[in-house]
Amino acid sequence: MSRVALSRLGRSFFARYTPLVAKDLLGCVLVRRFDSKTMSGRIVEVEAYRGRDDPASHAFRGITDRTRVMFGEPGHAYVYFTYGNHFCLNVTTEVQGEPGAVLIRAAEPMRGVEEMRRRRGRERLTDLLSGPGKLTKALGIDLALNDEDMVTSKKLFVLAGKKPAGVISSTRIGLSAGRDFEWRYSVEGSRFVSGARTHNYRVRDAVSTGVVG
DNA sequence: ATACTGATGGCCT
DNA sequence: GGCCATCAGTATA
C-alpha cells in the first residue's frame, strides 16, 4: 500500500493576497480531529473577503469584537454565527494587521463519513459538506474554534493537496454589497459544491443510477 | 426547476 | 430595527 505524505499548510501560505490564497486552497484537505475521530474533506469551493476595499467583508467597517481575528495573525480560524442557526468557517489571510479571510464553502468528504452523516442527519455524500453551514455542522465546528491557530492546531488544520485541473471564478453568494468581485472559486465539474443539486448534477445522477425521483 | 419562507440570534446603526 | 458570507421545507408548475 502506498501513501503520499501530505504536508500541513504553513503561515506563509496564508500571509498573501486573499483571492490568491482562496484559489490555492482548492484541492487542499481540511482536517477536523477529535481525540478518537478524524474527519476530512477536499476543499472544492471558497470565497475571499478582504477589508476596506471590500464592502461585502465583515472587516469593511474596521475592527470590532467579532472581526478582530480577521486583523490578526494569518492562518487562524475565523468562525462566526449567522442567521441564528449556522456557523461559518474561514481561515485568516494577509499579513498581521491587514484584514482578510477565506470562507470555506464546500468540500468533498474523505475520512470520517459516518461521523459526518450522524452529525448532519443526512445520508448522501453530496449533502454533507456542500455549503458553509452544512460543513461546520458535519465537522463539529463552532465558536469554540474561533481564533484557533490552524498552523499549529491538533483539532483543525489544512493539508496541501493536488491542484484541481479546472477552477471556476464567479460572484460571491448570499450578499448584497460587493457583488462586482468574482472572488468565489470552485472546482470545475465537482458534484460537491453548494447548490449543485439545483443545477445539472441531479440529472446526471439519475441517469447513471437508473433511478428518477 | 424555481420561488418563497420560517427558524433563530448576534451584530451594527 | 434591520440585516444578514444559511438551510430545509413547501408551494407552484
Image (cartoon, coloured by chain):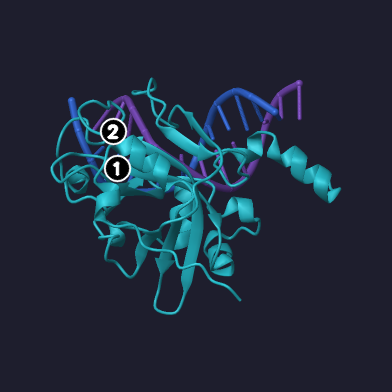
Chain colours: A cyan, B blue, C purple
Residue appearing at x 50%, y 45% in the figure: A131
Q: Is residue A126 something one can see in this rendering? A: yes
Front one among B13 and A150: A150
Q: Residues within 10 Å of mark 1 (few under 14, many from 20)?
A: many
| Position in image of residue A163 (x %, y %) | 49, 47
Q: Amino acid at mark 2?
A: Ser
Query: Considering the numbered disc 2 on the image, is that residue within a helix, a strand or a loop?
Result: loop
Q: Are marks 2 and 1 in contact (CB under 8 Å)?
A: yes
Query: Considering the numbered disc 1 on the image, is that residue within a helix, a strand or a loop?
Result: strand
Residue appearing at x 84%, y 48% in the figure: A211
Q: Sequence-wise, which precedes: disc 2 or disc 1?
A: 2
Q: Which mark is residue A84?
A: none
Q: Residues within 10 Å of mark 2 (few under 14, many from 20)?
A: many
Front one among A79 and A8: A8
Q: Quadrant of the image for the N terminus of chain A?
A: bottom right
Q: Considering only vertical position in the picture, is A62 above or below A125?
A: above
Q: Which mark is residue A57?
A: 2
| Position in image of residue A195 (x %, y %) | 58, 38
Q: Determine the image quadrant of residue A94.
A: top left
Q: Considering only vertical position in the picture, is B11 above or below A150?
A: above
Disc 1 marks which residue? A101
Q: Quadrant of the image for the C terminus of chain A?
A: top right
Q: Determine the image quadrant of residue C9.
A: top right
Q: Considering only vertical position in the picture, is A40 above or below A76?
A: below
Q: Tag 1, which chain?
A: A
Residue appearing at x 59%, y 68% in the figure: A114
Residue appearing at x 15%, y 34% in the figure: A62
- Nearest-to-viewer mark from 2 and 1: 1
Q: Considering only vertical position in the picture, is A179 above or below A12?
A: above
